[in-house]
Image: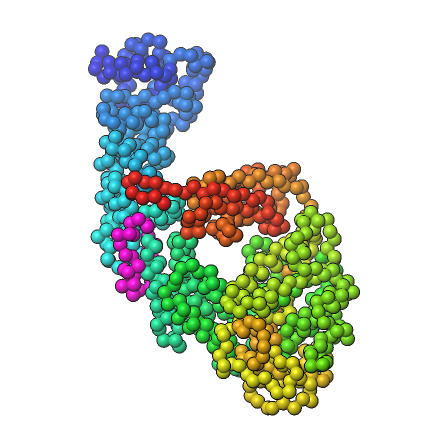
Amino acid sequence: MGDLADSIITELRQKFDRHPVWVWYDAQEKYKGVLDEVEAELNNVTLARYDDSYFELKRRLRDEDPDYEQNWLFYIPESRNEAEWFRDIHSLGRQYRVGQDIDDTPVTQFLVEHDEEIPDAYEDWGQNREYQRLAFFCVLFDTPGPATDDWVRTYLANPGEYRERIEDNAMADAWDAQLREEYGIDAGLDPKELATQLLFGEVASRAPTTRYDELAPDDARAAAEFCDEWQQYAPAEFTRYAEQIEEDYDLAEAVIDSDRVRWDATAFKGIDMGLIRLVMDRLAERTYADLPDVASDLVQTVETRQNSFWSNEDLVDWSVPALAVETLQRIGTIDTDEAKTLTSEELAQKYTNDDGWWQVDAAYRSYINATQEATFPYPNETTVKQRVTKHYMSFLQGVNRPLADILSDDPTLGTPQTSFYEEFADLEEGTAIIICDGLRYELAEAIKENLGLRTDFEQDLSAVSAALPSITEVGMAAHLPGELGLSLEDDDLVVTSGGEEMSGKSDRVDRLSAAGFEVVDMDEVSNISLEELTESDPVPRIVYSGTIDKLGESLDDDAAFSQVSSHVDDVERTVQRLKQAGYTRFVITSDHGFLYTDQLTDDHKVESPDLAPVVKRRFAAASSDTPLVDTDEFIEIDHEALSDLGINAPDLKLLFPRSIACFKAPGGNMRYFHGGISLQELLVPCLTVTTGEIEESASISYDVSIPDPITNSIISVEIEAKSGQVAFDPAPTLEIRANIDDEPVADPVSIEISPGDNSARVRLKQGAISGEDTVQFEVIDTDTRETIAKQTAQLDLLFGDDDMGFDV
């Protein structure tokens, strides 16, 4: 008997003491010549040889040993990968490799012990060093094939455990070779050095500086691609290493020293901080007149950084500089000289077009909101805010100054608001008219956008020309049936509709009720249960809301302006809830818009018209025969012009300060105005929303499962949908929200639901959850706006790492 056969027989006897079934693959048929000797010496072992038929091997096993009680050795002269039809039998046993061809090293023993975990592609690892290396790392890091990026991410997540296993199996040199081959890295098993080279590789690949090139690996591009996936799949680990490593380097200083705002690198938070400093410095220091052009040059930078890793994780807040840039850039696109040549209707079109001037108001409102909510002390913030506001004021003056002279002769900007009832009111069942006090046109655009994101409703947004003056009593009366009248009685402005005095909301409610509408407040709709809504009839309904005007009148700072956007959600929720009661047509409108300005200087404060009995800050009223001192500081609109607006005021004339000026008169907020002549005040939105009828379907119940405690910033939310329906048509859509103290800590995630199990991933923003103990989850039906589930989960995101020497 030869030495080879003797060695194999000895080895197999030991193996059959441990397990009864072994499979011996021999693709090169290296051992075919010793099979007879092996078979002769192995007592109580059946050697079954493959001869072009796996079926015959299976049949033999079934016939001779149906209960699998004997010892079997299957010899297959093919590779394991080729023997696909034998895998069911292989699963009963273990793979035999000839030990004489395998080195007696720790790694070979490791692979023998983990034989079943080795990918088929590397079954011949005993004869191939490269296969051995790849097989080891596939098994160690539990991957089905070569995945160096996955291996490195897993290693960096727990270097203490993996370094020990790599060293114990004498694979440190193999690890070095893998890193050099993939990235050109020479960090070995030092996790911090490995992370350092990867992170600075990303900087070297994408930053306009050579300052850190000596810290980068040879293949900076591969390192940058690794960092992209690291940020995506292990954001907490990425942040942990980046923040620790950055303590030794001042990346913000490097950015500032470069004086360049086009940095694409995202490896370190300091890069964003330096870019924020550069952007704010340029907005604060460049020539004031050039700011719109400066902003245009900065748009690409702020948009890119807003969508980059540190901003998405809420670890850097770009909102203030980004919105300052957007506001200035939009202002720069407007030719205010052109406004002087346009008719009133052309001005209205310029404002309300899809890309119209309303976008400037929306951007400035968002900018003010960002300055109110910011917790980060931006450099030059006060100076930049003053300059942005000054440009915004110039925009308001530039587009509104031509209005005064035009409207003194023709006071309409299109369809008069007094035509609202005739044009939009409908006493058919399924119609709801939502009237929001102070809903400016740009806020209606926001409602339209939000509804479009979550629904396929048909929407049409237009504008009517507010009744002058655009104050609450007049604007609200313009929605009523009957002629709108204005007069002076005992030095007070009296509003009538159809000859009846409208002294307050109750009078308007009575008039609309008499016309056939059910009138409610928006809060009442929110408090009606969904069950009650679905059982009620969709009678013609008017829904009132006074949120915006109350904010504007009561607060004398930016807080008023920043809070009005919250009303957008209220309106959307009202639409969705009323839809459950069978409403299919909604008209969303307002009594008037508003101006929000900087604190007006003395040159914008106009002396009150002498002898005018009614003087508000943005308008005054007097009898048509009252002699007034002629002045260029305000204009008059007489009863004939008012008649063109559908207003019966034969004995009245109205007086308005030009542009954004105000009369010297007592009032509340000196920055929030309505009642005057401006596009923002006069263009009243009319958003018509048409929905489909609700289809009857079997009820659906949901079981929502959210991890508790949460140990990773990326979590999986499982939703099981149960119903008598085999399929959902249409499929319901649920939205998953995560909040802490009612503030979002993750972007909402929408998921279209199918019967059975559904899953969605929610990514918590590290900056938003830092230092917090719990997070509240809400699952909301986007169609009904009802909360399907609420759950509070503990946060347990503490990471420890002895190698790095710090915790997060």
Q: Residue at the location (57% across, 44% down)? A: 789
Q: Residue at the location (38% across, 70% down)? A: 283
- Residue 4: image location, x then y, percent: 23, 17
- Residue 453: image location, x then y, percent: 55, 56
Q: Residue at the location (31% across, 44% down)? A: 806
Of the pair 353 and 305, the residue shown nearer to us:
305
Locate residue 490 relative to residue 194 in the image: left or right. Answer: right
Of the pair 170 and 102, the residue shown nearer to us:
170
Queried whether the magenta region covers residue 257, the answer comes back as yes
Queried whether the magenta region covers residue 307, the answer comes back as no
Q: Quadrant of the C terminus?
A: top left
- Residue 593: image location, x then y, percent: 59, 70
Of the pair 355 and 582, the residue shown nearer to us:
582
The span picked out in magenta is 242-267
| Picture quadrant where residue 175 is located | top left
Q: Residue at the location (65% across, 54% down)? A: 526
- Residue 384: image location, x then y, percent: 40, 69
Q: Quadrant of the N terminus?
A: top left
Locate residue 617 relative to residue 103 in the image: left or right. Answer: right
Q: Which color scheme is applied?
A: rainbow
Which residue sits furthest right? 514
Relative to 64, residue 156 above or below? below
Total labels drawn: 0
| Picture quadrant where residue 595 is located | bottom right
Relative to 740, residue 549 above or below? below
- Can residue 711 be seen at all in this image of the molecule? yes
- Can residue 579 be seen at all in this image of the molecule? no
Relative to 236, residue 570 above or below? below
Of the pair 649 and 723, the residue shown nearer to us:
649
